[in-house]
Amino acid sequence: MNELDSLVESAQQLFAQSATPAELENAKAQFLGKAGRITELMKGMAQLSVEEKKSRGAAINVAKQAIEAALTARRQALADAELQVQLKAEALDVSLPGRQRGMGGLHPVSLTQERIESIFGSMGFDVAEGPEIEADWFNFTALNTPEDHPARSMHDTFYVEGGSATAPNLLRTHTSPVQVRHAVQHVKQHRALIDAGQSMPEIRVIVPGRTYRVDSDATHSPMFHQCEGLWIGENVSFKDLKVVFTDFCRTFFESDDLVLRFRPSFFPFTEPSAEIDIQFQTGPLAGRWLEVAGSGQVHPNVVRNMGLDPEKYIGFAFGMGMDRLTMLRYGVNDLRLFFDGDIRFLSQFQ
């Protein structure tokens, strides 16, 4: 073995013993650095003849290439080893079940609202929306509840900034104000027909949405959901109210043997007025009368505030709590569960 072969073998052995990239670079310097052994051999060729330089230079280059090849191989080996350590440290146990993101769904009250809108939509009712921050006139006065009316005490609510001392703004206590707003717009749209003494298209609308009152217990919440209904025309009677609401309840609860009763009551915006109770004939609530809505013939003063002549136009209105309907449909006995945000409870309805 000549000198150059021995040099290559020494480099290969030293590279193989290098356990880290830093050690390997130090070993490289001994052979290929500025003061390395290959560099020294190249410098020693200065005293050789031209022919000797050719043969000696070629041999040294072969040795240099062999050392560089050994260095590259060791660098790759160290990099591969480091990668394997990293992969092992970050390894995933593919035998574990995957973690899936749960699918969301509609809130049970939203499901009830969709169901109500679908049922009344099949009867020809439109859906109307209005502001939750309402003017005192629409919320009370237009609905035949003037400032000194005792019924206002039943609607204690949250007043907000804006408006004036005589006409304050408040969080609406029911969705009935939207009935008036919708009717007023409807009358404006068909004013020419009305002034000409012709028949105006009927007003047939439901108004679902959030409402607010100072009240909180197992069956009441400061924020709750209502759905009001209104049907105004020239020949709309209490009989129509009974037919419409009976059909709605039996469809909503999927029970053809559901019994309804209309119990006399008082509301400022209807006259005559009635509470609507239902009775299931089967199931855990069988035999019990359950109040689900208030209703009545629209009061003449309210019809006037809509811009219509109560001598010509007549109709009925009703209002029901969507939260209560949801409780009855799903057998929930505490309203607060709907708004606690417990995903374990809410996921049952998906």
Image: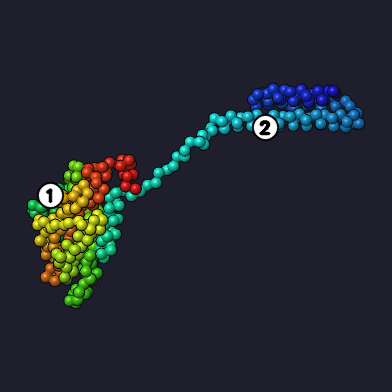
Residue 59 in the figure: left or right of residue 173: right
Whether residue 34 is visible to the viewer of this picture, yes or no, is no
On the question of residue 55 being in view, the answer is yes
Label 2 to label 1: alpha-carbon separation: 83 Å
Q: Nearer the viewer, residue 96 or 90?
A: 96
Q: Residue under label 1, please give it.
A: 154
Q: In the orientation shown, which residue stands out farthest toward the front?
A: 282
Q: Is residue 201 above or below residue 262?
A: below
Q: Is residue 77 left or right of residue 169?
A: right
Front position in the image: 93 or 306? 93
- Looking at the image, is 50 positioned above or below residue 162? above
Identify the mark at residue 105; answer none if there is no mark: none
Tag count: 2
Q: Residue at x 80, y 29 (%)?
A: 63
**Percent coordinates x, y for residue 62 in the rendering:** 81, 31
- The residue at 16%/50% (across/down) is 287
Secondary structure type for disc 1 = helix
- The picture places residue 101, in percent across and down from the top left corner, at 42, 43
> Dot 1 surroundings within 10 Å: few (below 14), some, or many (20 or more)?
few
Q: Quadrant of the N terminus?
A: top right
- 157 lies left or right of 62: left
Q: Quarter-wise, where is residue 176 in the image? A: bottom left
Circle 2 Cα neighbour tier, 10 Å, few/some/many (<14 / 14–19 / ≥20)? few
Q: Amino acid at mark 1?
A: Met
**Tag shown at residue 76:** 2
Residue at figure coordinates x 17%, y 54% from the top left: 278
